[in-house]
Amino acid sequence: MILHAVSRAGSQPQLPHIVWLHGFLGNHQEWMLVSEAFHEWPQLLIDLPGHGGSADRQVSDFATTDALLTATLRHHHIDDYWLVGYSLGGRLAMYHATYGQASGLRGVVVEGGHPGLSSETDREMRQRHDADWATRFRHEKLSHVLEDWYQQVVFSDLNKHQRTELVALRSHNNSVELAAMLEAVSLSRQPDLQAALLQLTIPFYYFCGERDTKFRAIATHLGLTPELISAAGHNAHRDSPAAFSARLLTLLHYSKF
């Protein structure tokens, strides 16, 4: 079994693939506008389990999710690649880099992804938090749940129009599959990756929206200098796709392939 994905050929096929991983509630189309700036690179835009064309793919934890990612890369004959992940996609990218079969991984770019909780108390609180949301996804009208979802503190920079737009965009999802994915890859179940990330020998870049104070602080705690995207919140590549693309292009051009 593999994940649904869209492949884009690059004008320089000898370059590593860029593999794009979207956030919770999204799909591969989240990266379409950004990916247009990377015409030199071969690319793979993936739908994660429970989302888009992979809505029927069922996983139980990070290991089974990563196994699907690895199988998908092999199916597309990708053994030389960068991972770029937003939020949930960023967490999966970090897990793959530290726990996965990642011999062909050239670098990791994370946008607003959490490296993991170190406190058991925090894990228990997060488990209850995600379980409550999963229950709502299963039993309430999706649009109503999403209206509350985008009221969370991490989305506090959104205005009313942006929230309404996101609710409309995300309401096409299968809420039952979303609930299952939310529980399977809850932050409460993610290993604390901080120490392992500091041992990486490949490039590791951390992107943040300028207004995303929570994840700017997380990057600082990791000892990283975040790549700040001006006039952007938690979803920086959506808020400022041109600025995000320009900064990532610069990093890729100057990184060792």
Image (cartoon, grey):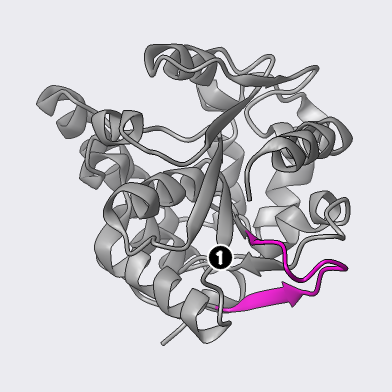
In the picture, measured across the screen, residue 35 lies left or right of residue 79, that is: right
Q: Residue at x 25, y 67 (%)?
A: 60
State the residue lying farthest toward the front: 256
Question: Closer to the camera, 156 or 185?
Answer: 185
Residue 252, horizontal then vertical, whole percent: 71, 42
Query: Which SS type dominates the magenta stretch?
Result: loop
For label 1, the residue is 80
Question: Closer to the camera, 14 or 71?
Answer: 14
| Residue 46 placement: quadrant | bottom right
Residue 66, horizontal then vertical, whole percent: 35, 64
Q: Residue at x 66, y 68 (%)?
A: 44
Question: Closer to the camera, 98 or 56?
Answer: 98
Q: Residues within 10 Å of mark 1 (few under 14, many from 20)?
A: some
Do we see residue 233 in this rendering? yes
In the picture, measured across the screen, residue 225 lies left or right of residue 123, that is: right
State the residue lying farthest toward the left: 120
Q: Which residues are magenta?
A: 4-18
Residue 7 colored in magenta in the image: yes
Do we see residue 61 in this rendering? no
Question: Closer to the camera, 76 or 208?
Answer: 76
Residue 207 colored in magenta in the image: no
Residue 243, horizontal then vertical, whole percent: 84, 30
Residue 189, horizontal then vertical, whole percent: 22, 46
When the figure is inspected, residue 15 is found, relative to residue 234, above or below; the finding is below
In the picture, measured across the screen, residue 210 lies left or right of residue 47, that is: right
